[in-house]
């Protein structure tokens, strides 16, 4: 159950980061890269 809550929290944090980026393509690319790397890490565990 804790992992589900962590995933929800991470997803909400990512939404806020996207909102705060306000169209800054560099920052948006960073957010996407972070998400891609975290998905790769969680799929290997």
Image: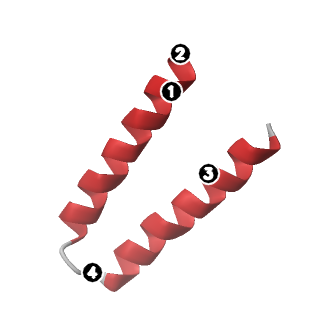
Tag 1's secondary structure? helix
**Of the image marks 4 and 1, the number of the one nearer the N terminus:** 1
- Write the residue at 53% across / 58% down: 35
Residue 12: % across, % down: 32, 43
Mark 1 touches mark 2? (CB < 8 Å):
yes
The kind of secondary structure element at disc 3 is: helix
- Among numbered discs 1 and 3, the one appearing first in the sequence: 1
Disc 4 versus disc 3: distance between alpha carbons? 21 Å
Closer mark to the observer between disc 4 and disc 3:
3
Q: Position of residue 33 (x, y in %)?
A: 55, 68
Q: Quadrant of residue 19?
A: bottom left
Please report contact status of discs 2 and 4: CB closer than 8 Å, yes or no: no
**Rendering coords of residue 40 (x, y %):** 71, 55
Q: Is residue 24 above or below residue 37?
A: below
44 vs 5, left or right, is right
Label 1 belongs to which residue?
Answer: 4
Mark 1 or 3, closer to the camera: 1
Q: Please state which of the two labelled residues, at mark 4 or mark 1, is closer to the viewer.
A: 1
Query: Residue at label 3?
Result: 38
Among the two numbered marks 3 and 2 on one chain, the one whose residue lies closer to the N terminus:
2
In the rendered image, the quadrant that contains the C terminus is top right
Q: Which residue is mark 2?
A: 1
Label placed on residue 34? none
Q: Residue furthest bottom?
A: 25
- Give the CA separation, mark 2 to mark 4: 35 Å
Judging by the rendered image, the residue that carries numbered circle 4 is: 24
């Amino acid at each position: 159950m804790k992992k589900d809550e962590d995933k929800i929290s991470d997803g909400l944090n990512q939404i806020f980061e996207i909102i705060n980026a306000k169209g800054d393509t560099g920052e948006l690319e960073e957010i996407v890269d972070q998400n891609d790397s975290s998905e790769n890490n969680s799929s290997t565990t």
